[in-house]
């Protein structure tokens, strides 16, 4: 108490002129609670930070989206597509490695853009709302927290305290969200094979080159076809036979089926043939089947009648093709061409020998298509293309074959009178025709001079295995291979103990002829024979180069053209709206 009295006395003893008085407003302490002070006015200035923030976000969003869109079509920093990189391009592996780095970087940047989309839009909306709304003067701490917490995006708040900039900001939030969702959902990662540099090449036949040689082949193809038909079975693997959906035939391609990767469109020839085999009436056979060997047609007849009481064998076979087989049905062009060949058969294995009114008649029509198709490649989904009507070359001048027909000498021959054992193997000159039709080659191989039937009828003793058979040996050894034995169901071969006499040889000839009466097995067998004929023909003159490449594994974004358009439109709307808000916040008064 005494101490307090002392302080009060000390204060009263201070001269009046030395006592502290309230300072002027400019000198008053802002922390003074005793003295009254005037309000300090701070002038606020507009800032360019909204534009800076917008520029950063726009750069991030645009960079990621542009890189993703471009890399979905072609490698970054390269003008060609993924499948059209020229072989002369240096360091192909480096191109793909750099492209992968760009794609990974774009993914990271896109993630950043997704995280920034809503905060940037909220910041712009908050500033514009404070600057434009009449309630900004009474903006409380709670309202400020609501704005910072994106509470303005609530539809209830927008309808109650909203203004035009707030409506725009609310719409931008929706557009920005849709934009980022579209970019993420429409874009997938696709693993592909790309060119790694030319690693090899092969040569295939070219139709133009095949047709250039107008000389005869000496019947080599027919002899090769006979050997092939004798040794081929249904279980043999054929590398040139490709499975093409929607093709009725068994097409032969000039190149083996493989998984090699091509990166530029390459075209090779393809020939496909299929046969129809039907029974016809005697009137049609008489009308269509004629002996026109002098005009280049094929006509053959094999007749046998045995008087052996132990084994009576009778058969009659007439074969004819009436079109001129001395002229190739193919033309020197790479465009598609279709031909039709017709074969007539009169088979009698149990009726009156030599009678054209007995037996069964068949008509076989072979339709063949020759042209070029696109090899499977990474560019076309590793699928073989269809047969092209026009060869897709703008610089190739197709050389057309002249109309001059190949003149081959043929002696006038007349059909011999039918006897008990009569053989006529047809016009031998057509054997040498170059570039035969596939059915013509098959018919010559099966029924012409030198065929199994012809040799068995003319020289049956050459097929007979002389007894006695050694008991230590194997009398069941194969003695004769029949053509198409693996397809007609005639057995693998004729055993040695089955041809002990000539009558047995005629019996096997009859059985072979009889196998052509099955309308179930013959079409498939002839289709296989046509394939073999096409294969042999297409094996010559391999002058067309085909390149192949094992390729490299890489990845790229996968997005459709519609996805690119939709994502770009929503991104553009979002950025344009943000730009308007940024300019408003930077230019208008605070």
Image: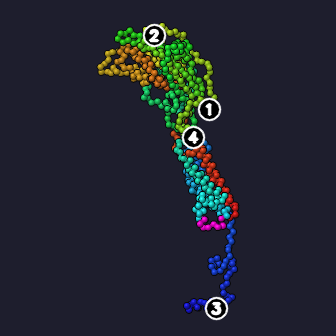
**Mark 4 vs mark 1: which is more N-terminal?**
4
398 and 284: which one is in front?
284
Q: Secondary structure at mark 3?
A: helix
Q: Are marks 3 and 4 in contact (CB under 8 Å)?
A: no
**C-alpha distance separating marks 3 and 4:** 103 Å
Residue at the spot 43% in from the left edge and 29% down from the top edge: 236
Asked whether residue 495 is in view, the answer is yes
Q: Are marks 2 and 4 in contact (CB under 8 Å)?
A: no
**C-alpha distance separating marks 3 and 1:** 119 Å
Q: In the image, which is nearer the foreground, mark 3 or mark 1?
A: 3
Q: Is residue 136 magenta?
A: yes
Q: In the image, which is nearer the foreground, mark 2 or mark 1?
A: 2
Which range of residues does the magenta coloring cover?
A: 135-143
Residue at the spot 50% in from the left edge and 23% down from the top edge: 275
Numbered label attached to residue 83: 4
Q: In the image, which is nearer the foreground, mark 3 or mark 2?
A: 3
Numbered label attached to residue 274: none
Residue 366, relative to residue 28: is it above or below? Answer: above
> Measured from the top left, where is residue 159 in percent x and y?
62, 58
**Mark 3 vs mark 1: which is more N-terminal?**
3
Numbered label attached to residue 354: 2
Q: Give the residue number, with chain letter if any, for mark 3.
A: 13
Q: Tell me if 389 is positioned left or right of 451 in this view.
A: right
**C-alpha distance separating marks 3 and 2:** 165 Å
Q: Give the residue number, with chain letter if any, for mark 1.
A: 393
> Measured from the top left, where is residue 582 in percent x and y?
66, 58
């Amino acid at each position: 108490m005494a101490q307090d009295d002392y302080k009060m006395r000390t204060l009263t003893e201070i001269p009046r002129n030395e006592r502290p008085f309230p300072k002027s407003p400019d000198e008053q302490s802002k922390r003074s609670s005793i003295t009254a002070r005037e309000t300090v006015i701070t002038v606020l200035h507009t800032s360019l930070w909204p534009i800076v923030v917008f520029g950063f976000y726009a750069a991030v969003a645009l960079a990621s989206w542009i890189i993703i869109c471009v890399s979905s079509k072609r490698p970054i920093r390269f003008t060609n597509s993924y499948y059209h990189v020229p072989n002369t391009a240096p360091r192909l592996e480096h191109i793909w490695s750099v492209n992968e780095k760009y794609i990974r970087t774009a993914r990271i940047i896109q993630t950043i853009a997704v995280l920034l989309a809503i905060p940037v839009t909220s910041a712009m909306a908050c500033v514009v709302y404070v600057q434009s709304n009449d309630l900004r003067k009474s903006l409380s701490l709670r309202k400020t927290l609501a704005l910072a917490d994106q509470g303005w995006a609530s539809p209830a708040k927008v309808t109650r305290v909203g203004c035009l900039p707030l409506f725009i900001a609310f719409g931008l939030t929706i557009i920005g969200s849709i934009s980022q969702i579209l970019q993420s959902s429409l874009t997938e990662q696709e693993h592909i094979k790309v060119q790694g540099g030319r690693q090899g090449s092969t040569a295939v036949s070219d139709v133009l080159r095949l047709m250039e040689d107008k000389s005869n082949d000496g019947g080599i193809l027919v002899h090769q076809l006979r050997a092939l038909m004798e040794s081929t079975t249904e279980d043999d693997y054929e590398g040139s036979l490709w499975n093409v959906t929607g093709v009725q035939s068994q097409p032969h391609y000039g190149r083996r089926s493989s998984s090699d990767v091509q990166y530029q469109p390459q075209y090779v020839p393809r020939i496909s043939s299929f046969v129809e085999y039907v029974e016809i009436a005697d009137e049609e056979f008489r009308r269509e089947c004629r002996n026109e060997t002098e005009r280049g047609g094929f006509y053959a007849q094999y007749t046998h009648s045995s008087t052996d009481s132990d084994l009576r064998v009778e058969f009659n076979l007439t074969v004819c093709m009436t079109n001129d087989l001395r002229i190739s049905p193919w033309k020197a062009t790479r465009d598609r061409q279709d031909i039709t060949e017709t074969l007539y058969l009169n088979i009698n294995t149990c009726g009156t020998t030599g009678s054209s009114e007995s037996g069964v008649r068949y008509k076989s029509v072979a339709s063949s298509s020759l042209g070029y198709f696109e090899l499977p490649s990474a560019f076309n989904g590793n699928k073989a293309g269809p047969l092209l009507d026009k060869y897709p070359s703008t610089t190739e001048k197709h050389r057309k074959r002249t109309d001059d027909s190949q003149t081959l000498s043929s002696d006038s021959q007349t059909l011999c009178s039918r006897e008990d054992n009569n053989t006529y193997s047809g016009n031998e000159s057509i054997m040498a025709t170059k570039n035969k039709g596939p059915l013509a080659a098959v018919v010559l191989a099966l029924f012409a001079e030198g065929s199994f039937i012809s040799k068995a009828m003319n020289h049956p003793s050459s097929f007979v295995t002389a007894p006695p058979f050694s008991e230590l040996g194997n009398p069941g050894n194969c003695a004769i291979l029949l053509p198409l034995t693996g397809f007609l169901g005639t057995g693998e071969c004729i055993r040695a103990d089955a041809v002990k006499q000539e009558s047995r040889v005629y019996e096997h000839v009859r059985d072979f002829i009889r196998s052509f009466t099955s309308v179930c097995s013959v079409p498939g067998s002839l289709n296989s024979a046509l394939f073999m004929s096409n294969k042999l023909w297409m094996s010559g003159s391999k002058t067309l180069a085909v390149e192949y490449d094992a390729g490299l594994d890489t990845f790229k974004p996968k997005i459709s053209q519609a996805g690119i358009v939709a994502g770009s439109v929503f991104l553009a709307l979002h950025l344009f709206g943000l730009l308007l808000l940024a300019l408003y916040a930077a230019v208008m008064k605070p």
